[in-house]
Image: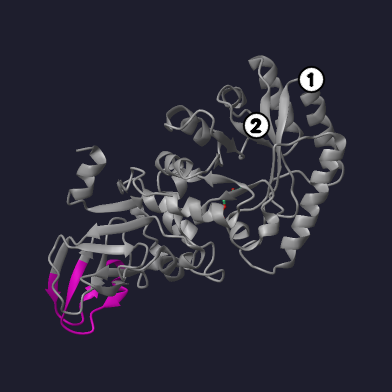
């Protein structure tokens, strides 16, 4: 029995089951939606809480040719220990001065450069390494966050990058940008950003840049804006089977299936009288005689405290709502007199087709987005991988 197989059957306090067949199916669905583009599986922040290496391997098996992370450290770990084919491209974009440029060059990462300080550091590291760095120039086409401003700043960055390329220190492998409002279809900034991005690409190419890939689309743009796909789409949340926003549609509308199922073992069921205060602060009081169930996961496990008195859980075939406050390690549900056996599985969220809530339901209960729900599941919750083998056929 592999360790994962043992965990799957063990009566765990809590587990986040990760369905790797769903990752593979989601990659195939996304590739079908963006047939002219390569696919970058974005696996930052431990694969949005799902496990970066496992999800990266599944995504690559299903046709992703690029992986994306925020930090260089995440990318270096993937390259060294990810168990990935050597030719998979790995890009990282969130750099700070003094970052591990030399290690990134040696690991054949594609690095993002948004400004002159980064270009200077990466060229210095490349000189030392005796190897050209793979550099992707990031344009701020209107997000107003990272990226190089259009105009003089872009002209300077492009000029100096081309000079470094001419000197054999870097290879400009990509020109790229990121959307502000792609999850709001019809938002005027989307067209404006596409126009600006095309202009910034055209300028760099007129000056002599020959990027392998130009890219701007995240999950929502991949799902809704084929004209934003260019050479590569960078999908994160959709890879994990979650819709970027309920306004765009449900995952199934795009052929996507949620990957994570979070469950816990009911730790205690007990009878209490009416008028009994429940959990810290007594924010909930039983209306009458009832049963309470103790669910042994809390905000340290990523159950949002903001979902106090609101988060849904499937227990014994019924949706129950958190009674009172979420504590660090546990919360209570009012079972209304039902008496499920201790040890029964309470499902906080999953794909939804077993009647359980979804990560989107939790996002709404906590006043946040489903991205945050899955990403914050704590390290104390074991990830249990299912459908690891590629038994499914494309
Ligand atoms: C996180 C991230 C993505 C993926 O976004 P999703 O909406 O999850 O698809 C793409 N590009 C960049 C730069 C990111 O930081």
Q: To which residue does mark 1 refer?
A: 167
Range covered by the magenta-colored residues: 270-293
Q: Which residue is mark 2?
A: 97
**Residue at figure coordinates x 44%, y 49% from the top left:** 394
Where, by quadrant of the figure, is residue 1 drawn?
top left
| Image x and y of residue 100, in percent | 58, 27
Residue visible at 60% across and 54% down in the picture: 34
Q: Is residue 297 visible?
A: no
Report the Cα–Cα distance between label 2 and label 1.
Answer: 23 Å
Q: Position of residue 285 (x, y in %)?
A: 26, 78
**Element type at marker 2?**
loop
Q: Nearer the viewer, residue 240 or 115?
A: 240
- Image height of 53 relative to 104, above or below: below
Horizontal arrangement in the rendering, residue 367 relative to residue 172 (left or right): left
Mark 2 crowdedness (10 Å alpha carbons): few <14, some 14-19, many ≥20: few
Q: Is residue 128 visible?
A: yes
């Amino acid at each position: 029995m592999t360790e994962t197989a043992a965990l799957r059957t063990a009566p765990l306090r809590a587990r986040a089951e990760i369905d790797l067949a769903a990752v593979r199916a989601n990659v195939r669905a996304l590739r079908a939606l963006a047939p002219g583009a390569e696919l970058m599986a974005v696996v930052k922040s431990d694969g949005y809480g799902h496990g970066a290496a496992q999800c990266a391997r599944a995504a690559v098996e299903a046709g992703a040719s690029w992986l994306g992370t925020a930090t260089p450290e995440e990318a270096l770990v993937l390259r060294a220990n990810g168990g990935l084919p050597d030719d998979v491209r790995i890009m990282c974009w969130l750099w700070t001065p003094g970052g591990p440029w030399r290690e990134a060059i040696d690991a054949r990462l594609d690095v993002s450069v948004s400004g002159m300080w980064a270009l200077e550091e990466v060229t210095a590291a490349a000189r030392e390494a005796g190897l050209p760095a793979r550099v992707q120039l990031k344009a701020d086409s209107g997000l107003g966050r990272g990226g190089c401003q259009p105009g003089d700043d872009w002209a300077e960055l492009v000029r100096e990058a081309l000079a470094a390329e001419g000197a054999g220190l870097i290879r400009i492998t990509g020109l790229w940008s990121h959307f502000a409002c792609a999850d709001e279809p019809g938002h005027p900034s989307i067209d404006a950003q596409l126009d600006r991005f095309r202009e910034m690409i055209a300028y760099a190419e007129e000056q002599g840049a020959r990027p392998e890939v130009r890219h701007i689309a995240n999950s929502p743009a991949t799902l809704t804006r084929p004209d934003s796909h260019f050479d590569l789409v960078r999908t994160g949340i959709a890879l994990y089977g979650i819709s970027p926003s309920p306004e765009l549609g449900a995952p199934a509308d795009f052929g996507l299936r949620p990957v994570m199922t979070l469950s816990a073992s009911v730790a205690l069921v007990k009878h209490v009288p009416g008028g009994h205060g429940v959990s810290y602060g007594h924010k909930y009081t039983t209306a009458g005689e009832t049963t309470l169930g103790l669910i042994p996961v809390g905000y340290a496990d990523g159950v949002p405290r903001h979902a106090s008195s609101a988060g849904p859980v499937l227990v014994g075939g019924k949706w129950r709502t958190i009674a009172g406050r979420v504590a660090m390690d546990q919360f209570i549900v009012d079972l209304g007199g039902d008496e499920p056996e201790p040890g029964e599985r309470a499902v906080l969220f999953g794909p939804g087709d077993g009647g359980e809530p979804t990560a989107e339901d939790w996002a709404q209960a906590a006043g946040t987005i489903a991205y945050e729900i899955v990403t914050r599941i704590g390290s104390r919750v074991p990830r249990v991988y299912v459908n690891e083998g590629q038994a499914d056929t494309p």
